[in-house]
Image (cartoon, helix red, strand yellow):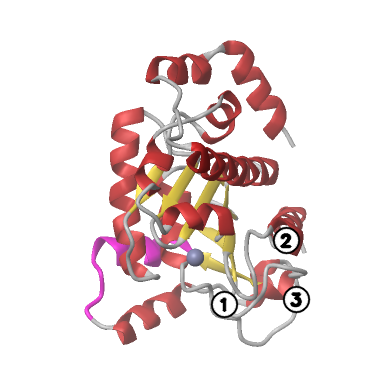
Amino acid sequence: MTQALQSLIDMTRALGEPARDYVIIGEGNTSMRRDDASFFIKASGHQMQGIDETGFVAVRFAPMLAMLDEPPKTLTEQKAITESAILPPNALGGTEGGLAPSPSIEVSFHAMLLQECAARYIGHTHPTVVNQLMCSEFAADFAFKRRFPDEVVLCGPCSALAPYADPGLPLALVMRDSVRAYMAEQGEAPKLILLENHGMIALGDTPSEILNITAMAVKAARIYLGALMTGKPTCLPEDDVQHLYKRPDEIYRRQRFVAK
Ligand SMILES: [Zn+2]
C-alpha cells in the first residue's frame, strides 16, 4: 500500500471517530487524487470509523466526467459506465487478485470536484450540528455569510451551497452548477460546500486541511445555533471578510495549518 493511500485512510478514520459526531454507521465518504487519470474513493458499504485499505477503490476520471457531460438515460447504463471506470484491486498497491469493491454512490461528485476544483483530498460528512442548519430556513444565511475571523481563514470568504438533489448523479450535476457559479464570482474554488438537507464537503490539498475545515464548519454551526437562541445571529461585514481572507498574516497562518 502506498503512503498516499495511508494518508487517505488516516484522514477517513479521523473524520469517522464517533466523538466528533460527523458521521454514524455508513454515512459519509472521502477521496484523494491518485494521478492525472484516476482517484481513490471510499467503497460502498464501508464505515469510515476504523476503515482500512479494503474499504477503498481506485476509479478512472474519464468515464465519470463523460457521464456528467452526457448523463445516461437509465440507471443500468449509469451502473455499467461506473463499473467500467473501476481499476483492478492491485491499483491500491497490493498484488491480490479478485474483484474490486464498488465505489460510493457519490463517486460522480468526487470525480467532478477533484477535477473542477483541482482539489487533492475531499471529505464528505453529515455532522449533526451542520445538518441542524442545512435542514432549516437558515441554510443560505449560514452558507453565504461569516460570523468570526477564523471561520473566514479556514473555510473561505463564503461557502458554495447546493440545493437538495437525489444522491448520485443528480446531486453531482446540481453541485457542479453551484461550484461553477462560486468560482465565477470568487475567482477560486470553494473550500467548503454545504448541501441542503444533506451535509457538507471539505476540499483541500492535505488531510489536515480537510480536518481543519470540517472542524471549523462544525464550530461555526454551533455558534450560529447558539446565537439563534439569543435572537438573530450577526455577521461580519463583507469588507471585513475580504480583508481577513486576503491579509498576509492570515494567509501565512492558513498555510501553516495545512502544511502537513
Ligand atoms: Zn452524504
Mark 2, secondary structure of its residue: helix
* x and y, in percent, of residue 74 in the image: 26, 83
Answer with mark 1 or mark 2, whichever residue precedes in sequence: 2
Could you tell me how far apart the alpha carbons at marks 1 and 2 are, in whole angstroms? 15 Å
* x and y, in percent, of residue 226 in the image: 56, 42
Report the residue at 73% width, 70% height from top: 53
Quadrant (top left, top right, bottom left, bottom right) of the C terminus: top right
Write down the residue under mark 2. Answer: 9
Three-letter amino acid code at the position of disc 3: Thr
Specify the segment rendered in magenta: 60-73
Going by the image, does 56 lie left or right of 86?
right
Q: Is mark 1 within 8 Å of ligand 1?
A: no
Quadrant (top left, top right, bottom left, bottom right) of the N terminus: bottom right
Write down the residue under mark 3. Answer: 95
Of tags 1 and 3, the one toward the viewer is 1
Mark 3, secondary structure of its residue: loop
Write down the residue under mark 1. Answer: 44
- 2 versus 222 height, above or below: below
